[in-house]
Image (cartoon, rainbow, N blue to C red):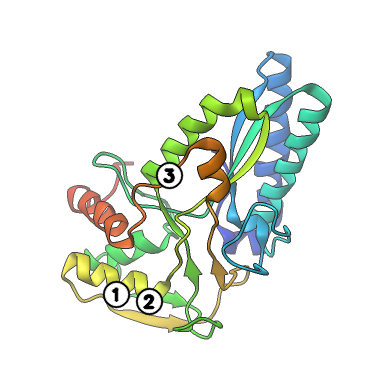
Amino acid sequence: MAAETIVERSMTDPKSFFHENVIKGVTLLDTMLECNVDKIIFSSSAAIYGEPQQVPITEDHPQKPINAYGESKLIFERISDWYHRAYGLEYIALRYFNAAGASERIGEDHNPETHLIPLVLQTVLGQRERVKIFGTDYNTEDGTCIRDFVHVIDLAEAHILALKMIDEIKNGVYNLGSGQGHSILEVIETSRKVTGREIPAVGGKRRPGDPAVLVASPERAEKELGWEPRYQDLEVIIKSAWEWYKKYPEGYIR
């Protein structure tokens, strides 16, 4: 799970992403071989697909990353496959779409914060003046990016299922998403509904490396892993994050 993940920074500092996500990843695999550990579940990303040719995106969709973050994830997937062929490594790559939400005890607290829902809720808490929307001129219904938000509890359950199935599957890749797309403006409007607060928002320029639409087809994960997301409703996802933020408005103590 450990990785450099900020897409925008990967466009200006790609070497740190290849060093952390690829070079150190290979070091991990080599150490596993030395210690006779032959199984790994890898947190990959929808960023490997780049600009989708069709949605929802299936696992066999062409993989053409448009940012160094996605490229680094794809490289490690390919390396894992070669280690499977040569050394018998058993691996499952789980391609996350937009992880979101919270459990009662654990929520999102990044430094710096780049994820949309935490940024929106921090604005509700008065920690930010407004939400900045990166691009309002995309070829979507309201001009903002569309993303597939998947609850973190559903992601956790997918990892458990992958662990149970890895001996049978041995080398597999799976999209983890709800199969539903929501625009940035829709997330902000739903957050207003959940919190009962007005949320100032302002349009800005696009960020380099951001595809217009990313929506998963979770069909393979449902069929082969027996995974079925339980928290697909956007309002439920945002509400779980809001409940956590009300308990921990300053996030974790650093």
- Asked if residue 95 can be seen in this view, the reply is no
Q: What is the quadrant of the C terminus in the image? A: top left
> Residue at label 3?
228
In the rendered image, residue 198, in percent from the top left (x then y), is placed at 21, 76
Marking on residue 189: 1
Q: Position of residue 91 (x, y in %)?
A: 66, 31
Q: Residue at x 62, y 72 (%)?
A: 208
Position of residue 213 relative to residue 239, above or below, is below
Per the image, label 2 sits on a secondary structure element best described as: helix
> Image height check: is 76 above or below 121?
above
- At label 3, the amino acid type is Glu
Location of mark 2 (residue): 185
Q: In the image, 104: left or right of 1?
A: left
Disc number lying in front (1 or 3): 3
Q: Residue at x 31, y 47 (%)?
A: 102
Q: Residue at x 53, y 32 (%)?
A: 162
Q: For this rendering, which residue is in front, 125 or 155?
A: 155
Where is residue 164? Give x, y as percent. Answer: 52, 25
Tell me, yes or no, if residue 119 can be seen here. yes
Q: Position of residue 61 (x, y in %)?
A: 69, 58
